[in-house]
Image: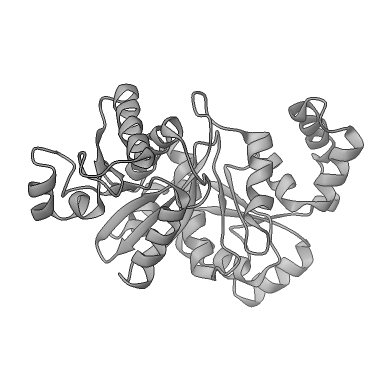
């Protein structure tokens, strides 16, 4: 089954409610139309109810979605109090009231935090920092997770792989890299991928040397110690991780080499370049980044996204909410 059809099937009967703070943006509205028609996800749009309703009625959509106007919200005072408490002295009541009125991402994240919706997708017209910062401040990371990370689902026909971290951590140390690998395994399983995790490097099993190689070797050991149940190997060059014939020569006996489907890059430079090369040269669709490690799902769109990207990332966010 195609990956998004599989996600849709798993969401039947769940009625996952995902807030889209940029509710008046045309790409968001087009994605809402499709979500209502094709899935059981309930889009919750922030914005002017009259404008949104008129747009969607013209598109033939009369129900199956919700609209919240932050300027006239009956739980606003509850939200202000909760934000002040959550920021613990870092934000006054006046500051909280102001930010919730002026910043739809803070408003959306508070809906998630209070359990009024199940997740959030934003970033069509906001920067990554504007989307991620409120999530890190308010929703925060899961217990025993010290940082969030960004993975891309790479899809071409029936092929599907996971690349991480391509979006958040610039130069993760060994502990961070191990954590990224473990969280990427969780994400992979959500997409129906039984993870075989390759810790990538310019070296395979001691063929090269340097601080970067040492970091990947140490990260592999840490990940093994934390999660001995996971199939994970490193350090591996990409060809050794991906090509069975090369794996037989460079990493004989490895249960991951030549069969990897989750690729952990040593830093954001390699990860960002790698996913874009696979997308542009290899013809893979890159879906994400999927933010990993948060207590509740919040995901960031590219400002260059189209309605299809919004639709797919909203499905993923709903799947994360159900999976957690």
Point out residue 177 in the picture as x, y percentages from the top left corner.
Answer: 41, 37
Of 157 and 76, the residue lying toward us: 157
The answer to whether 154 appears left or right of 133 in the picture is left
Report the residue at 77% width, 33% height from top.
Answer: 83
Q: Residue 56 is drawn in which quadrant?
A: bottom right
Point out residue 284 in the picture as x, y percentages from the top left corner.
Answer: 33, 66
Of 129 and 27, the residue lying toward us: 129
Of 7 and 234, the residue lying toward us: 234
The answer to whether 254 appears left or right of 321 in the picture is left
Q: Residue 189 is drawn in which quadrant?
A: top left
The answer to whether 127 appears left or right of 175 in the picture is right
Q: Residue furthest bottom?
A: 58
Say whether residue 115 is visible.
no
268 shown above or below 285:
above
1 shown above or below 319:
below
Point out residue 6 in the picture as x, y percentages from the top left corner.
Answer: 33, 54
Report the residue at 74% width, 46% height from top.
Answer: 107
279 shown above or below 251:
below
Report the residue at 82% width, 45% height from top.
Answer: 99
Say whether residue 203 is visible.
yes
Of 90 and 171, the residue lying toward us: 171
Quadrant holding the N terminus:
bottom left
Report the residue at 35% width, 59% height from top.
Answer: 154
| Applied colour scheme | one colour
Q: How many marks?
A: 0
The answer to whether 5 appears left or right of 124 in the picture is left
Point out residue 119 in the picture as x, y percentages from the top left corner.
Answer: 57, 45
Q: Residue furthest right?
A: 94
């Amino acid at each position: 089954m195609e990956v998004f059809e599989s996600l849709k099937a798993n969401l039947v009967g769940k009625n996952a409610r995902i807030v889209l703070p940029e509710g008046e943006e045309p790409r968001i509205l087009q994605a809402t139309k499709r979500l209502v028609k094709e899935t059981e996800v309930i889009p919750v749009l922030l914005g002017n109810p009259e404008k949104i309703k008129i747009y969607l009625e013209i598109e033939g959509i009369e129900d199956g979605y919700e609209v919240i106007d932050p300027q006239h919200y009956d739980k606003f005072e509850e939200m202000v109090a909760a934000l002040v408490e959550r920021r613990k002295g870092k934000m006054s009541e006046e500051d909280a009231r102001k930010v919730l009125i002026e910043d739809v991402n803070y408003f959306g994240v508070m809906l998630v935090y209070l359990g009024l919706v199940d997740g959030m997708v934003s970033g069509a017209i906001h920067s990554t920092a504007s989307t991620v910062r409120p999530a890190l401040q308010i929703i925060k990371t899961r217990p025993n997770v010290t940082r969030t990370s960004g993975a891309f689902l790479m899809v071409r026909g029936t092929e599907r792989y996971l690349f991480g971290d391509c979006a958040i951590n610039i130069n993760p140390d060994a502990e961070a890299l191990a954590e990224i690998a473990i969280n990427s395994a969780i994400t992979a399983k959500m997409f129906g991928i039984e993870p075989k995790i390759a810790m990538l490097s310019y070296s395979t099993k001691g063929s090269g040397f340097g601080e970067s190689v040492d970091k990947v070797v140490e990260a592999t050991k840490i990940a093994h110690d934390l999660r001995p149940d996971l199939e994970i190997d490193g350090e591996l060059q990409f060809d050794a991780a991906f090509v069975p014939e090369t794996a037989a020569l460079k990493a004989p006996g490895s249960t991951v080499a030549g069969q990897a489907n989750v690729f952990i890059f040593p830093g954001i430079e390699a990860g960002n370049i790698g996913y874009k090369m696979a997308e542009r040269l290899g013809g893979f669709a890159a879906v994400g980044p999927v933010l990993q490690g948060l207590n509740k799902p919040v995901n960031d769109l590219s400002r260059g996204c189209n309605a299809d990207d919004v639709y797919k990332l909203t499905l993923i966010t709903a799947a994360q909410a159900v999976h957690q």
